[in-house]
Amino acid sequence: MVAASPEKAKEPSQVPSKNAQRVSRRKFSLPLLLLEVGIALASGGLSGTVVAAWSVSEQARIDDIRSEREGQREELRSAREARQENLRFVRDRSSSQVVERPFQEIDLTGQNLTGLKLSGADFSGAVLKDAKLGRSDLVGTNLREADLSGAELNSANMQGASLFQANLKDANLVSANLRGANLAWANLEGAILVLNDVRRVCYDDTTVWPARFTPPVTRCNFWPPPGNP
């Protein structure tokens, strides 16, 4: 009598089940995830009222995030439109004639003022960060405490300008005329100063110069004290 051969143990199937395939292919979205979590909570014994309240709370949080982002986008749009309006205001006063140019604390971040004639303008406290001012006429302008960081001032005529306590960090000042300008308390860290006319420029120990730049011999012995630039 031939003994029956023992049956081989069945190896577990290597083919994923249909349910596993569906899970692996599923693309989760936040609303779907919230729904599934809610179902899971309900199956755990929580009442439908609790699950509904949780879902409403999560949806309100999502709505708040969307509203906040939309508000931020609206603020950016408003700021951009305000700068463009400020630019038109400045351009309208660009001329060789002596006119009043009251630009105190104006925001011109990133705006193009290349070649404008703005001698004698009052830019005190203005924001000119990353603005383009190359070849512009800024003779005798008041740029006290102005933010000119990253600004393009190449070949600009800034003779006699007051840059007292101005921020000129990383500004491009190649070939800019700074003769007689007041740079007391100014920050020129990282600025590009090449081929500049710096005769009779005013500065003191608080002036921050770019690395490896040799300041002119003159200081502030011919200029009013820093408190009265």
Image (cartoon, rainbow, N blue to C red):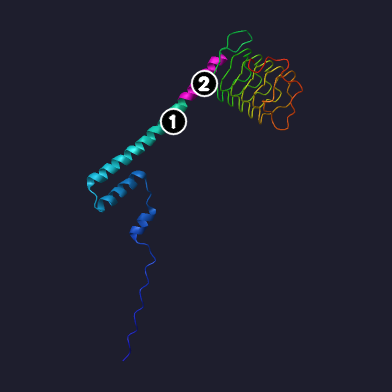
Residue 172 is labelled as none
Magenta residues, start to end? 78-91
**What residue does disc 1 label?**
72
Q: Quadrant of residue 16?
A: bottom left
Given the image, on which type of amino acid does mark 2 rest?
Gln
Tag 2's secondary structure? helix
Q: Is residue 87 magenta?
A: yes
Residue at the outermost bottom position:
1
Query: Horizontally, is 150 left or right of 194 in the view?
Result: left
> How far from the left and from the top, in percent, is residue 186?
64, 24
In the foreground, 84 or 100: 100
Q: Is residue 153 magenta?
A: no
**Residue occupying the point 46% across, 24% down:** 78
Residue at the outermost right position:
217
Q: Residue 2, relative to residue 55: is it above or below?
A: below
**What residue does disc 2 label?**
84
Give the quarter of the figure containing the C terminus: top right
Q: Residue 1, relative to residue 71: is it above or below?
A: below
- Tag count: 2
Give the quarter of the figure containing the N terminus: bottom left
Residue at the outermost top position:
98
